[in-house]
Amino acid sequence: MMKKQYSHLVLFLSLCTLTACNDSKNEDSIDPDPLPPSITYHVEGYAELGAFDHNSTLTVFPLDKSLAHIEEQAYGGKVETDYGLFSASGNMKFQESLYFEVQVTGNFFNGTKGRRSEHKTTLRAINHVINHDDEERSINRYIKLPATNVNIFTQLTAARICTLLKKAAGYNEMSHTITDIYRNASEQALKEVLTAFSISDIYVSMLSIDPTRASFSQYNAPASMMAAVSNILLTSVDEELLDAFFTEWDKDFAPDGRIDNEDIKESIRDGQQSLKYTNVYKQLDSFYKAYDFKSDFPEFWKFVDRNGDGILDKQDKPDDFEITEEELTPSKQQCIQLLEQVNKYLRDFLQTECVWEANFCGAIGPIPDYPTTLVPTDSEVYEIWTAAYATIRQCNYMIHILTSKTYDYDVKPYVGTAYTIQSLIYQSLTQLFGDVPYVTPDNFNDIDYGNHVTRTPVKFIYAKQLEALGKYADALPPDAAQTKPESHPVSFVAAQLLMATMYAEIKDYTNASKHFAKIDSNTYLSAYLWKISNNESPMLDKPLYKKYFEGPYHLIYRIANQNALRVELLLANNQVAKASDAMKKLDREWKGSDKADEIRARLLEKGVNIMGQTFGCFSFLKRMGAAKKLLNIKDYQLLLPLPSLIIAETPGITQNTGY
């Protein structure tokens, strides 16, 4: 086993330095044309074998054409928390390739021991830049690198990814076209790693697993698989020998994606058979609960081939672990945990989209060197798109689970909440991008993309979502929860306000007014109709959001949103006198007017401020017909470009006109 067989390597390895790949730099290479001066790059993520502590250090290296470190261009930082969260900024140049490596060294929580490790370990992750080719927009810009978690998946795949990249034509081009090359290499390497641990590689494609996105902070299958692999190795490999193990793994695995080394095979088998699952799970769950992670630690026994037959099934369950049919159906508490997970994704989307939208519409900022009008290669447009579909997918998973079985508690409020959150995302997506792929609880795996995925007309999406909302809205509670809102269903009021807004988006003012009337006569104790906690659980740091929106909650709908929509609908229905009177609820200084243009001008003034602080400012300006003039944009810029990466990997999706 590894505890004995690698002890002779420790002294030798202490004299060696880690490099990104085993190739050295070519001293005879011709220098490329000079690029713009150093740019400030920001990277964030979680460092987890278990969670690395706050004394751990990190280094970010740009990689050269041979995928080796460019040492003089590296910058450093530290892990910020004891649950592994890091965030670091520094100046770098990507002169030879668009790849970079994040390396973390430190002590970590060892769930197999129930304590912090006694020896430091180094993990690394290979990733790539997705928006560097737009050089004019990059000059003097603060650019956020893709979120890059560093974990057992990124460590075990890193050297293999380098091998696969160098076999691909054009892997070192300074263009966003390398994204497909990187994604294919990463996917293949992870499939090969999972195969070595007797885990079906079908999960990689089915769940769109990206090693740099996997984290224990997420309540999902990739987190469970990562926990299984981490704890299998921590069971069989002593802490002081981990770096030696990783070196031997890279030597064996990088060339062909196979493990032939019998010592490594024995370590995997020993870890699978000796892992004390129940004890390890309880220690990991207690550790994360101590840092206010509200969801249970992801269960991972199903990904441990305990009996060594190469098949994952119920025969692998721990001896002290009972499987019942009820466990396959979420209890009410587990349902609440699913809802909390959906809200984590919603929060991530809001914290990504609202910074751009509020800055673009002039409600905040202007933020120095931050893009307003976007181009297809901008990271902001890609992050908005991917965060939106991640949220939609979580909603679909929850809807599918809760509507496919019978429960001993009322699931309708939770299903209605999932549809409400999903509809909010679709409203935003369609107003930003126009027609988009429509992913439902019946086809939610299709967002992994393929030739069959196409853009669906906005009106069709709205019809389907409004139909679902109409079915479940009455089951929602009448009032919004004011404490721990992410653990409670959204309110009937929020759902009706969303439905009225969606009908207004497609200029169906009759139905918009019908749904608005269901809430217009009610009186509320709180000014907040829909809000979500910003601080309920640890999450990736978003410095711009924290600067401009910092607070315990993100407000999605306030009473002010309701008052603004009331005026908007009255104007749309040519009820000028009533609109003027309704304006008094929105603006206490309003003196009244019988001119629609004056009412509309005041509504715009107040609405930008309200929606800029909450949600939906850009779509509000478009509904009011004021976006082009107020934002000084052209017709085609009323829709954002689709991310170039999505266009490249999805032949059935076409780009918006003008981009």
Image (cartoon, rainbow, N blue to C red):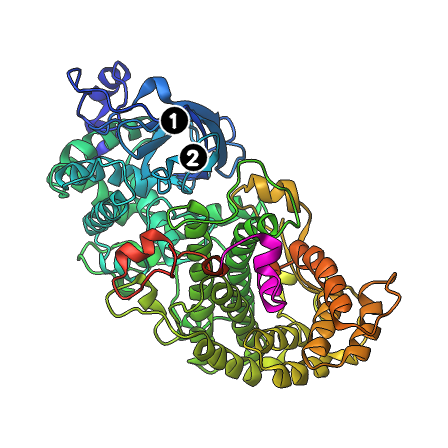
Which residue occupies the foreground of this view, 251 or 504? Answer: 504
Amino acid at dot 1: Pro
Q: Residue at x 85, y 68 (%)?
A: 584
The residue tagged 1 is: 36
- Number of residues whose C-alpha sits closer than 10 Å to that of mark 1, classed few (under 14), some (14–19) or many (20 or more): some
Instruction: Tell me the quadrant of the picture where the N terminus can be found.
Output: top left
First in residue order: circle 2 vs circle 1 = 1
Which quadrant of the structure image shows residue 481?
bottom right
Residue 659 can be seen in this image: yes
Q: Which mark is residue 71?
A: none
Q: Is residue 162 magenta?
A: no
Is 209 situated above or below 528? above
Write down the region rendered in magenta. Answer: 618-634
For label 2, the residue is 138
Whether residues under marks 2 and 1 lie with C-beta atoms below 8 angstroms apart, the answer is yes
Q: Characterize the local packing of mark 2: few (<14), some (14-19) or many (20 or more) Cα atoms within 10 angstroms.
A: many
